[in-house]
Amino acid sequence: MKIIRNLFSLIAARTVVWGVLLAGFAMIGTAAEDGTQDPLRIALTGRYPPFSFYNTQGELDGFDVAVSRAVAERLNRPLDIVTTEWDGILAGLLAGRYDAIIGSMAVTPQREEVVHFSEPYYLSGAQLFIHRDRRGEIPGIDRIEGLRIGVVVGETYEQYLREHHAEHVRVVTYDDTQLIFQDLIHGRLDGFLSDRLVGAWQIRAAGAPFLPAGDMLYEERIAIPVALENTALLASINMALADMRASGALDRLFDRWFGLPDGHDDPNASAASPESMTFALALRFLLKGFALTLLVAAASLTLGFLASIPVGIVLNLSGGPVRALTRGVVDFIRGTPVLIQLFFVYYGWGMIPVIGMSLSPLAASILTLSVNSAAYMAEVVRSGLMSVDPGQRLAGRAIGLSPVQVFRLIVWPQAFRIAMPSLMNSVVALIKDTALISVVTVSELISNVRSVVSVTYNPIYYLLAAVLFFMVTFPLMKLAGQLEARMRAKGFDHD
Amino acid sequence: MIEAQNITFRYPGAETAALSEVSVEFPRDAISAIVGESGSGKTTLMMCLGRFIRPAQGQALYDRTDVFDIPEHAFRQRLGMVFQKLYLFPHLTVLENMTLAMRHAFGRDRRETDQEAEAMLERLGIAEILDRYPSQISGGQAQRAAIARGLLLRPDYMLLDEPTSALDARTTDAFAEWLRSLKDQTNFIVVTHDILFARRAADRGVCLMNGQIASEGPIEEALSRLHLNEK
């Protein structure tokens, strides 16, 4: 715990320094331009209906989004919404990637140690929901042993369950609510602990067969966190909220999303129940994501391949410190998960003293994937170079070619042909690895398909996304096979 | 003239020297053969003459100059080498194999080099393999193509390492004749363990045993003296 707290204070200290510098830049920037304000950067997940989600038009919508707009309007700043995973949302705030989170975050003592919370903008509470079919079976969370209860990783409910109900409840963690709903429908969970409002809204909007079981477990104050040092922003957000409360704007927003028209709990009546996204729209959304996926893959492959050639050559040296160092780096990259590398580059890059500047999600993704593919392709290049008969170099020298010409005209063309099938496999692997970058807020295919499923409740879109991937990877895999066959026919593996 | 002057060479970690105090001359206007069993040091001698190995003692001379004092680029133009495994470049056609060095190492024009290469293959009787890849031609054709690749650079001398290793007895005879027909093109030095081939192809011979010269002189003389020594 101490280490984590130290880490946090380190992050916070750095954020202060950079915050000051950035503020300086920002002031220069605003002075130079025509007085336009810096955008207010607000983070939310975009996958937490009805608080934030993509609506039928494929646009961000929901109660939190509406609150964000209202706050930005009152601060007289343009709004820039950043969608990010819940899991790293606080780390992103501490790293200065956005100014505040309006993502239905509950105030907890632990969180208060690292951020400042505004006044609450609504109150809710923890509620156990179960499948309608088991209404009589599960009267409440502590009346029955061994319940499998789903929670979202990093939400307050997880910790609550582990602290208060650890003995008779099995906590199952998920990346997002959507997956919990699917598992509850399929009977892999007995229930889930979530926000009372979310559960109620889900039942209404999706016709999901869930019911609340027992009383609310505790009440939560939902508020807006900002970085500790950002007291000016905190004050203006509090003023904005106070104004919204006084003018009734906040109540009207709340009613629009959660109010029941005639006062009783009619599951089908809602002021803002979203219709399901049409297939055409969903497809367009997926294709848009896929275009980004392919862009990232193409950029990373190009950079990675270019880097892999010198690295492969160095790996092929017989010894020396440069080779040893390169060997170590390549092994480290290949021996650690891409996901961890991606998190480090995205959240940690800005903390490296010399660099000091954090990367955009897209840049972080391309950098990580490029370095990763360079490491893998360098091995392929190395073994390609190794399988070229040393006599080929000798023969090249014997007819008067310089060492550079020997490499360029004789060794490399052969090594490349030998390496080609394996390189194709690296390409396929990298294209699939792009799936990981959804965790750093790049709205590529995986991120988009999860958003689509979170409003359509139709898991078939996962399959559709898989098919999109396959349409690109399959021809590449075929090509790799054909190249290999042709290589063998040409007798490249012997002289 | 190419000559070895008092060359001694020992491979790292080897107990005995591969060559000890070898001195021999290879005059122009004669095909010379370096004859010996495997391990006799004949390939090491070739690598020394070809400027691939620097002797520990003594030197290889080209027209009285140490080969390592001649810039490599200039030296390669005067002395061609064809290795036992030929090392045609598998990713290039025969024609491209032949013109590669002329174009890139000596900056010659492509059309011109193509014509020269075609004429050379015509003369060597293998014009039909022009556009084939090395994997698509026979061992004998590959042998001739590799020699043709070297000849195109118009070398003063040309070293051939075990040129008959992939040929049977009948084609070996034909190859010896063919080689003699090219005497006007360059001065060949063949490294071989095949005494019959050496007798047919060469004018002069140097016989090596255990890294030392066993006999030397006109080919018949050198070989018969070798036999006497063996007895």
Image (tube, rainbow, N blue to C red):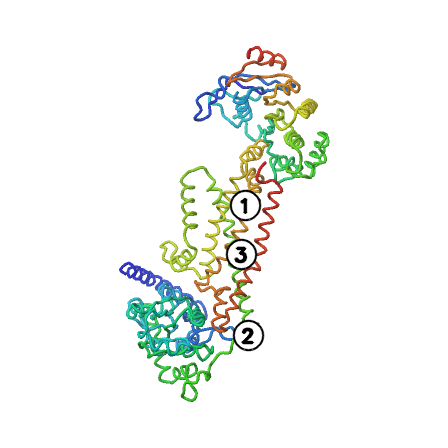
Secondary element at image label 2 = loop
Mark found first going from the N terminus, 3 or 1? 3
Label 1 belongs to which residue? A419
* Residue placed under numbered mark 3 in the picture: A298
- State which chain disc 1 sits on: A
Q: Do labels 3 and 1 share a chain?
A: yes
Q: Splitting the image into 4 quarters, where does residue A232 fall?
A: bottom left
Secondary structure state at the residue bearing disc 1: helix
- Distance in Å between CA atoms under marks 3 and 1: 19 Å
> Residue A278 got which mark?
2
Seen from the viewer's position, the closer of residues A490 and B114 is A490
Amino acid residing under circle 3:
Ala
Tell me the kind of residue under disc 1: Ala
Quick check: A456 above or below B175? below
Q: Position of residue B153 (x, y in %)?
A: 64, 30
Q: In this view, does B64 lie to the left or right of A264?
A: right
Q: Quadrant of residue A8?
A: bottom left
